[in-house]
Amino acid sequence: MNWILLVVAVVAGLAVGTALLLPQTTRTTVEVRFDAPIRAVWAVYADFESQPNWRSDVARVEMASNKRRWTETLEMSGMRVHFQILEESPPNRLVLKTGADGSFEGRYVAEFRAENGGTVGTFTEEATALGILPKVMRRLFFNQEKFIEEYAEEAKAEIRRRESEADG
């Protein structure tokens, strides 16, 4: 019976030790090509209020009266993620402060450039986990690169929808 407790203690110790070695802050950069003019891409990325209509992971958006702060409630977890515009240079650069109470805080940078009749977006997300448990949960259950890529795919679909609506 004592050896079972010893094994459990060793496994728990290894888990805690591994968690302590994980970086507190992660940074991911992804480049995405859009087959749309830069202003069309900007219009979708900067239209925060409409995101529940085209992002599958956002249940609702609550905008502050100044339109420079808002909170997104995520569909599956119910987590509330807060945003604040730090810098906005249409249609080329958007910098946001991000965070979720007790979970993480970070910075999101979207940079757009016109290229060969389309647009290239470079997206950088930096997130700092606030504690060991959020650090482990984020590492196990959240893939920043995949999140940025899925967001871009949903944005592309919304750009196409808006273009066809304008044509139709």
Image (cartoon, grey):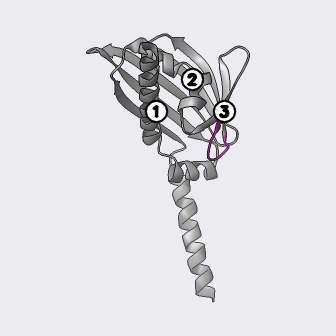
First-in-chain label (1 vs 3): 3
Q: In this view, does 68 lie above or below 3?
A: above
Labels 1 and 3 touching (C-beta < 8 A): no
Q: What is the distance, in whole Å, between disc 2 and disc 1 at their CAs?
A: 19 Å
Residue drawn where x is 47% and y is 33% of the image: 151
Does residue 63 show up? yes
> Closer to the camera: disc 2 or disc 1?
1
Q: Which residue is label 2 attached to?
A: 96
Residue 31, quarter of picture:
top left
Q: Which residue is label 3 attached to?
A: 60
* 74 in the magenta segment: yes
Q: What is the distance, in whole Å, between disc 3 and disc 2 at their CAs?
A: 18 Å
First-in-chain label (2 vs 1): 2
Residue 8, quarter of picture:
bottom right
Q: Main SS of the magenta segment?
A: loop
What type is the residue that disc 2 sits on?
Leu
Q: Which residue is label 1 attached to?
A: 154
- Horizontal placement of 52 versus 148: left or right? right
Residue drawn where x is 41% and y is 24% of the image: 160
For label 3, the SS is strand
Q: Which range of residues does the magenta coloring cover? A: 73-79
**View extreme (left): residue:** 116
Task: Please state the total of marks drawn on the protein image.
Answer: 3
Q: Position of residue 92 (x, y in %)?
A: 44, 13
Mark 1 is surrounded, within 10 Å at the Cα level, by few (under 14), some (14 to 19) or many (20 or more) other residues, namely: some
